[in-house]
Amino acid sequence: MFDRVLYGGVTISDLLISITILLAAVIIGKAISLRIRHSLRDKVSKDRLNIVSKIVYFSFLIIGFLIVLPLLEFNISGFLVAGGILGIIIGFASQSIVTNLISGVFLTFERPFRVDDVVKLGGESGTLGVVEDIKIISTTMRTFEGVYVRVPNEKVFTGNIINYLENVARRFEYNVGIRYKDDADEAMRLINELIEEQPMALKEPEPQVFVESLGSSAVELKVRVWAPSTEWFPLRMELLWKIKKELEENGIQVPFNQQEVWFKNPLQMDEDKIS
């Protein structure tokens, strides 16, 4: 029964052997990729480990197909010749895919960012969000509005990348205006004491509070604070409101924009015309 010819010189036995080889390639590839994940999970980052395990798995599948095709009397060289013209056509269509694939490999080894990092891809006007997944072809991000964005790796690799969590600490700053009649020294003292009370405000580098400029309607104070990158945004939101309340409770107010107009020749108004 196993010697029965299906087509050409291919028998049922050849078909069963081919299926066995393919199943073995899948099982061995899966087993080795899982073994790699288990042995390197504490030594290699999650995103890089995913890439390596997938490359190993698909490599075994390709080897299995290359072994099976001759058994089933598929002429590989014939496929290559026949697929030459088709390959040219597909080549143009798949150029971006290959570019994204190569860029994905480079990103994996360079690692300008990791999963869960807060990054902006494409420079200052690019996409800001949390990295959800780094794949071979594309990178998936979740914006702070809850929108998922898929960015091709070629654009990621060739564009500017701003990683807000790469450094352990980040600085933020405020411009705080006070009235000219208020005591600037007292205002700076109150702000410094308030910063010292914040557990997430770093002592080193030291916070800075100083008079930056004398504006048209206010004395402009500059406030600079360093915070851990993971706490930068919450502290930045909370501290400004606390500064405003602290100053107001001590009689120091943020002035409105105002402008004084002086007339060289005061206008003389006719009381008869007014009445």
Image (cartoon, rainbow, N blue to C red):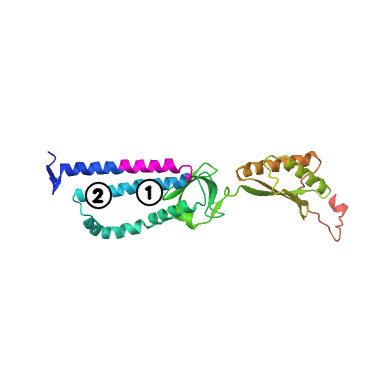
Q: Is residue 112 above or below residue 195?
A: below
Q: Which residue is mark 2?
A: 67
From the top left corner, tell me how far across and down residue 129 is, in percent: 53, 46
| In magenta segment, residue 111 | no
Identify which amino acid the numbered label 2 is placed on.
Ile
- Please tell me which residue lies in front, 110 or 121: 110
Magenta span dominant secondary structure? helix
Decide: few, some or many residues near mark 2? Use Cα within 10 Å; few <14, some 14-19, many ≥20: few
Quadrant hosting residue 266: bottom right
Whether the magenta-drawn stretch holds residue 27 is answered as yes
Q: Position of residue 160 (x, y in %)?
A: 53, 56
- Which residue corresponds to mark 1? 55
Label 1 and label 2: CA atoms lie apart by 19 Å
Label 2, secondary structure: give it: helix
**What residue sits 78% from the left and 40% below the top?**
248
Residue plotted at (34% across, 47% down): 58
Image quadrant assignment for residue 228: top right
Foreground residue among 143 and 218 = 143
From the viewer's perspective, is 188 left or right of 234?
right
214 sits left or right of 272 in the view: left
Residue at image location 84% in from the left, 51% down from the top? 274
